[in-house]
Amino acid sequence: MSKQFVIACGGTGGHLFPGLAIAEVLQKRGHEVLLFVSPKEIDQTALKGYAGYRVEKLTVIGMPRIYSFKMISFATRFFGAIGHCMGIYKEVKPSAVLSMGGFTSAPAVLAAYFKKIPTMVHDSNAIAGKANRFVSRYVTTIVLGMDECRKFFKGREIQITGTPIRQSLMNATSKDYKALGLDSDKKTIFIMGGSQGATGLNSLVLAALESLEEKFPQWQFIHLTGQDDYKRVKETYEKLGIKSFVSAFYSRMEEIYGVADVAVVRSGASSLTELAHFGLPSVLVPYPAAADDHQTANANVFVRAGAAVLLPQKSTSGSELAAQLEKIMDPEVLVKMSQNAKNLDVPDAAEKVADLLENLCRK
């Protein structure tokens, strides 16, 4: 029997993309899905490839310090968003509401609580987000991407599902170098700063490029720069004559993962999940401004598994990054790290969350 589900998943790619992956599974099972997202560009760009979902925007921002004047604006938007959600629930009558985390999603959970609608929260990170910790007392079920996060929800029954990834990535099988203008006989290094905080990582990679090209002309690069750094990064590759594909943003990530051999990326949970699925060894450079330094905690899960190397942005030089890439590119190391990454993959995470949502409606 078809049901109506709400997924609140906006604000960052780490919240949005796993939410979309779950929406895909629910829609395939014949259910209707309403998405709450933020007005941010990352959300609007990503949603262009998805049809069949009703989309509503929630303009809640991240919570400022308690004694900040910005708290007045935050509270006004937050309670306004709760009222907006309650009005929508009166119209669509959802069977259950899922939050993927972040304060953009919190009003959707609280509105459901007031309307006595079953709720679920999913946290992908090793350290629970502040919004998820706040709303956890009001939700019916808590599901996690990593077991390391369990300690933040003491006294609650927890389900470990892994973090969902989109069907376009799950179904990727081919290696299409031509689509990116690259050579099939070169090793490919993939660099991405994520939906926020790319500049520091971009600068670190640029500092490493010259020595890398001198030592390893058989390497080529895919570099997703973010909008602000595109011109600077593109010009550097061209000046050094390095084979590369440089773009501010790229929606067909399956093409990139299909040809990459090693990744240099932030350690958001969604990115790590994708690395695990493709068995991609990585150099992880956690975003220094991430809340509670959760990206370092995420990275350490992969380091302990032998799937990645962690390099702190503030204390790492370009030459050190180049040296680490040289070590990983050793054929034996590459194979071992690739298998270790693959061991962390949870390929049915989206199905697990969808199952739990359906079961929630039956209680």
Image (cartoon, grey):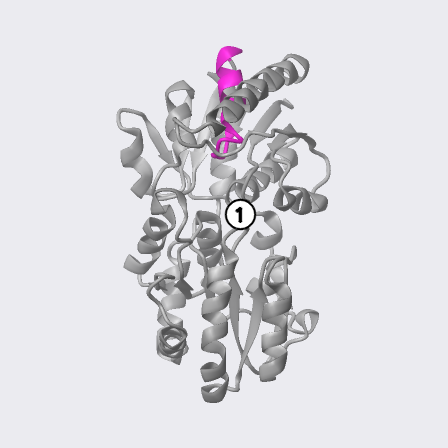
Residue 170 seen by the camera: yes
348 up-or-down from 331: above or below: above
Closest to the observer, 128 or 356: 128
> Which amino acid is tagged 1?
Ile
| Magenta part of the chain | 99-116
Disc 1 marks which residue?
165
Percent coordinates x, y for residue 237 in the rendering: 59, 77
328 left or right of 354 in image: left
Q: Is mark 1 on a helix, strand or loop?
A: loop
54 up-or-down from 257: above or below: above
Percent coordinates x, y for residue 201 in the rendering: 47, 63
Residue 358 seen by the camera: no
Percent coordinates x, y for residue 359 in the rendering: 48, 24
Closest to the observer, 299 or 141: 299
Task: Count all numbered tags in the image, as a single digit.
Answer: 1
Residue 291 position by quadrant: top left
319 up-or-down from 136: above or below: below
Reply yes or no: does residue 101 show up in magenta: yes
Circle 1 crowding by C-alpha within 10 Å: few under 14, some 14–19, many from 20:
many
Percent coordinates x, y for residue 102 in the rendering: 48, 34
275 left or right of 242 in image: left
Residue at 37%, 67% in the rendered image: 337
Reply yes or no: does residue 121 show up in magenta: no
Residue at the far front: name it.
Answer: 69
Residue at 53%, 31% in the rendered image: 104
Q: Quadrant of the N terminus?
A: top right
180 left or right of 116 in image: right
Residue 34 position by quadrant: top right
